[in-house]
Amino acid sequence: MPPEIFDVVVVGTGWNGLISAKTYLDFDANANLVLVDEQATIGGAWSDEKIYPGLFAQIKYGQFEYSFYPMRHEGVTKDGYISGQTINNYLKEFAAEFGLIQRTRLRTKVVQVTRRPDGGWRLNLESGKEAIECAKLIYASGAASHPVIPQWPCSERFNVPIVHSSEIRSHVDKLQKIRRATVIGAAKSAYDTVFLLLQYGVQVNWIIRENSAGPMAIMPPTILGICNTMDAVSTELVSHLGSSIMQTKGTGYWLFNRTFIGRSIAKIFWKTIAIIAARHAGYDKSPNAQKLKPVPHGNGIFWANAGLGCASVPNFWKAFHEGDCKVHKTEIASLSASNTVELSNGAHFDTDYIILCTGFDKSYHHFSAELQETLGLVSSTYEQVKWAKLEAKAEKKIDQLLPAIRESPITTVEVPSRSAHLEKLLHGPSRHYRRLIVPDIAAKGDRSIYFPGFIDTIYTPLVAEVQALWGVAFLLGLVDLPSQGDMEAEVADWNVWTRKRYLAQGKKHAYAIYDFFAYINLLLGDLGINGRRKSTALAELFLPKYPRDYKGITDEFRRALSTRQGKAYAKGTKVV
């Protein structure tokens, strides 16, 4: 059966896939473009299959949308946080508004991606569907589409459902009727799941491995009831206070990183935020709650070792302290007869359900091991010496530029689970320039693929929008690139920085939880777009920035192109 041929294939219909498709069509309205997704509905992590009652994003209304397409004001908490249903509706409406639904093929699972001998890409599909081929591939499956499923020694007489947190939607009716449940993991999904179960009156045993990165650092929804926490985080000031590799010039950098007074101010700021967060959570109310203190104790908000979250659901901590929830800092040893969970510390209890809040691995498994290395998706076995030299040089540079993160506050290394069987995980930042493209093949003139969405920030829609503009410009040859050596040095700088700055999270992901505006400005600068979006320097530094502040960046890029190339480009007209 001959394959279908397309100009462009977009894998994924979440935040990144939808905006990537829309942006490409903005520059080539006649492109033969198709989106594919294995799910039954559009939305990625916010599709019908993934959301459930009581699920809220940890971001404020007005901050979780594309710059040019406002979200409806519905399903918003009194503190301003957005429900999963509102986000789901937004993405489906966006796809309909811009003609993407008719270009989308749902229930279409990619099982293998290969290079065509003459260039371009071939995607083999599940269930005997004919393959599709394309000249350009936008691999936007994102960082939340391949769930991590641990397994333990299990008795044949253990008859309890074991489901991943991404499957909760289809189990809600049953979860409301059970008496006992076991939640495994310490990511934001674990907090959301525990809250949901406690709301249903379920007795919860919450298991967090003792030798893991520990519980996630949780911010309060507001700072002392005065301002929304996400407003405070969404300022340029926080980037300067947060030791970002992407902000190492200017007065703000010099003050907060190169002077004793500035570094002292930064330390006081982060310590104060940590105290506010700890008091809001009430960690010291009980030995049970103390087990949820983020590591390192007293400064977990700054380091975000296990990630950073926000208590976006109303009354999370009240529900936790008043509910029947016991936290276990250990791991599962086995699942025994009579539906009993045996723990490594000798404790045991019965359960009616097990919910795995064990996160996601990168969805690169569709590429062969060799192609994963070629595309910078995993570390290359044949270039270890080169990258070791680049990263050693990067470490010296970062230690000199950012003294606050020179020494790690955590000396112990996360120990893998002793009892759970895990397939080989693809954890670790990729080796992509600007977190999007492969230096080696791009330097050879191959502009046929980019990888949006594999960076962890809290401003997902805006980061996705700017990545899409940069990525499409790359595919169409509209953005200049530095030499391969310079691109690889940038990759090394980033990967060394993110693991020094964010510790365990930085070793697993391209993590930039306080640095998203600095990253956005970096991409915009490459495109000739002014990253400054406020009227004054003080406003730029102290006021929160919203996606709407970036409205019109595509037109700004067209104008920059026109200035550079001496001719105008209309929307939808292919630029060559």
Image: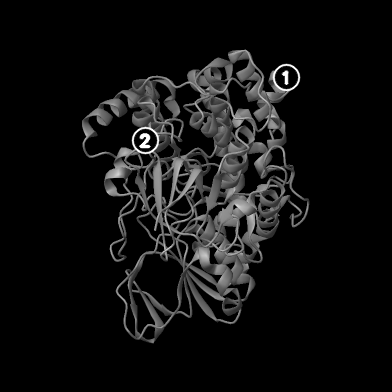
| Residue toward you, 504 or 96 | 96
Q: Which residue is mark 1?
A: 536
Residue located at (50% from left, 37% from top): 512
Which mark is first along the chain, 1 or 2?
2
Q: Which residue is mark 2?
A: 431
Is residue 404 rendered to the left or right of residue 157?
A: right
- In percent of width and height, residue 151 lies at 34, 68
Question: Going by the picture, which residue comes out furthest to the front?
Answer: 2
- The mark closer to the camera, 2 or 1, is 2
Disc 2 secondary structure class: loop
Residue 532 visible: no
| Residue toward you, 486 or 439 | 439
Q: Is residue 52 above or below residue 442?
A: below
Is residue 514 rendered to the left or right of residue 351?
A: right
Q: Is residue 320 above or below residue 26?
A: below
Quarter of the image with the C terminus is top right
Give the amino acid at mark 2.
Arg
- In percent of width and height, residue 271 lies at 55, 38
Q: Residue 480: which disc?
A: none
Give the amino acid at mark 1.
Thr
- In percent of width and height, residue 78 lies at 76, 54
